[in-house]
Image: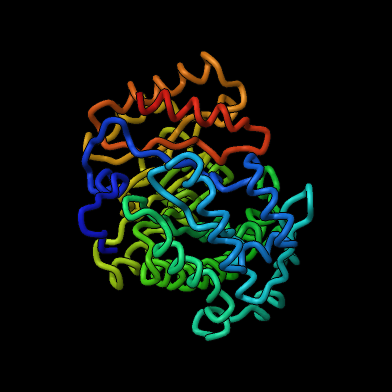
Amino acid sequence: MVQGQGTERRLMRVLAGEPLSPPPAWMMRQAGRYLPEYRATRAEAGSFLDLCYSPDFAVEVTLQPIRRFGFDAAILFSDILVVPHALGQDVRFVEGEGPRLDPLAGRPEFERLRHADDPAVFTHLAPVFETVRRLRAELPPETTLLGFCGAPWTVASYMIGGRGTPDLAPARALAASDTALVDELIDRLVAVQTEYLVRQFQAGADAVQIFESHAGSLPEATGPEADALARWSFRPIARMIEGIRARVPGARIIVFARGSGLEGHARVVPETGADAVGVDWAVDLAALRARLPASTVTQGNLDPELLITGGPALDAAVDAVKAATRGLPHIFNLGHGITPPTPVAHVERMLARLRA
């Protein structure tokens, strides 16, 4: 999107390949339960989905970490599961347990879902686009606004299993036993989520992130035909990115393929066409940078647990990220979302150390 006169969005400069020191910073789940103001707004909103679908509340919680910490980017407050909800699948959030969906166990459940061209899908999602429009108007002009969605494999795995499981056994089993059905589900998610991100750009998002939170559930390749990571993850994401850029030329897109390992992270940009690779905390950032072209943009990858620990261990981890990316285009972030027990003072310490 066009930036305001006399302003610069540092994160967008990095996504264009420019190294900056200190690097721009934001955190996954930066609007969340570690903030007392978020907890107060969450209590006022009622259910988690009410919080997501109310532009008043969603704008407020998105802005809270920007007011407190001055992050270089705000990420739209929503959830990846609003998409299956818009497709007609029952979605609910159980306090203390997380999301629950009515499992998509076979073709009868799939046939009950809305099609990608059903206007009701985007009528359902209209509050999200209104939130994006209002955020762009209310954010400081120098702050990048990030939209997002889940990657097709990650969203499909929730839809099939009805919840997150450590090994995603239901999704992997259905992909093996009824490959055609899972292909159709992935195709529908590619179509819907391509349009979903295009509309986020049109509403005012500067860039978007695609969360492949369950890349680690896909087995390592034993040959071109057995490359599950490419088949179920990278190729569908590449189709999304191609479709987005056909409608939004030059769209900036980050892909976060959590759990895909050093090799998987190295494949993200060349195989999906993303502008940047989000790096999870388990990957050696220095080793990854050594394998990537110097022009590749990386993002991450501080261990969220070190934010809870704080002190010298946190300082050393921040310094290690800076050392691994010095002179290279990098966006400082965590290697996963910030967790509720994190002290606010530790976030302040992290940013002070980064910006020193």
Viewed as shown, does residue 97 lie left or right of 28?
right
Q: How is the image coloured?
A: rainbow
Please provide percent x and percent y for residue 93: 74, 58
Q: Is residue 318 above or below residue 47?
A: above
Q: Is residue 268 above or below residue 345?
A: below
Q: Is residue 57 above or below residue 13?
A: below
Please provide percent x and percent y for residue 152: 52, 61
User: Residue 330 occupies which quadrant of the picture?
Assistant: top left
Please provide percent x and percent y for residue 117: 49, 84
User: Residue 136 occupies which quadrant of the picture?
Assistant: bottom left
- Total labels: the figure holds 0
Q: Quadrant of the C terminus?
A: top left
Q: Is residue 200 above or below residue 325?
A: below
Residue drawn at point x = 68 percent, y = 66 percent:
50
Residue drawn at point x = 47 percent, y = 46 percent:
66
Viewed as shown, does residue 71 lie left or right of 29?
left
Viewed as shown, does residue 165 lie left or right of 253?
right
Pick whichever, 280 or 266, lies toward us.
280
Pick whichever, 308 or 352, lies toward us.
352
Q: Quadrant of the N terminus?
A: bottom left
Residue drawn at point x = 53 percent, y = 31 percent:
347
Pick whichever, 37 or 223, lies toward us.
37
Please provide percent x and percent y for residue 133: 43, 69
